[in-house]
Image: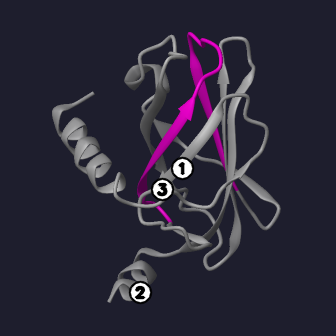
Amino acid sequence: MGKKLQVFLLLQLAIMTILASVVFEDCGSVYELYAVNIAGCGSRLPCYITLGEDVLVRLEFHADFLSRKLDQDVVIKINHINLKTPVTPELCEIVDCPVSTKYVTSFTSIMTVPTNMALNQRGYLRWRIYNENEVLVLCYSVLVQTQSPIQKFLFQK
């Protein structure tokens, strides 16, 4: 991971620690999911996501058992269309694997919002994390609404 990305992640992490968790729906987590922080979203729904933007997402959870590998599967579903959403870095690049059962684990990923989605539409961000045995260890869903970069700029004024 590059130095600039590390500094950026640390800065965003510091900002996000003072923000409240978004309202999320657990969709079958085996681990206990405590908080989901999405940069730019507070506790009000929907969470506005901007097309083409890189968004920091931070999770806090407790693992009931060890996992040696974690893989993320992130989809945004708008108008009955599921769009796979790129996420970096992979979890075991930033979280020491195996995941410990002794304390709460936190990690931050960067999600890139696809540009080929309809604007001003509501849908769901669904984030699934599987371990090396393909067990669904974390799963959550958040109500989102799409916006353009211009809309984001105008709404911030």
Q: Which residues are magenta?
A: 51-76
- Residue 10 vs residue 49, the one in the foreground: 10
Q: Which mark is residue 123?
A: none
* As drawn, 137 above or below 25: above
Q: Is tag 3's residue or tag 2's residue first in the polypeptide sequence?
A: 3
The residue under label 3 is which amino acid type? Ile
**What residue is pinned by disc 2?**
155
Q: Of circles 3 and 2, which is in front?
A: 3
Secondary-structure class at tag 3: strand
* As drawn, 144 above or below 110: below
Q: Is residue 5 left or right of residue 101?
A: left
The x and y percentages for residue 41 are: 48, 66
- Residue 31 vs residue 67, the one in the foreground: 31
What is the C-alpha distance between the residues marked 1 and 3? 7 Å
The residue under label 1 is which amino acid type? Val
The residue under label 2 is which amino acid type? Phe
Magenta residues: mostly which secondary structure?
Answer: strand
Is the Cβ of the residue at disc 3 closer than 8 Å to that at disc 2? Answer: no
The x and y percentages for residue 71 are: 60, 25
Q: How many numbered callouts?
A: 3
Residue 70 in the magenta stretch? The answer is: yes
What is the C-alpha distance between the residues marked 3 and 2? 18 Å
**What residue is pinned by disc 1?**
36
Secondary-structure class at tag 2: helix
Q: Seen from this angle, which residue lies furthest right?
A: 80
What is the C-alpha distance between the residues marked 1 and 2? 23 Å
At x 39% / y 60%, what residue is drawn? 19
**What residue is pinned by disc 3?**
38
Residue 133 in the magenta stretch? The answer is: no
Q: Is tag 1's residue or tag 2's residue first in the polypeptide sequence?
A: 1
Is the Cβ of the residue at disc 1 closer than 8 Å to that at disc 3? Answer: yes
At x 35% / y 81%, what residue is drawn? 153
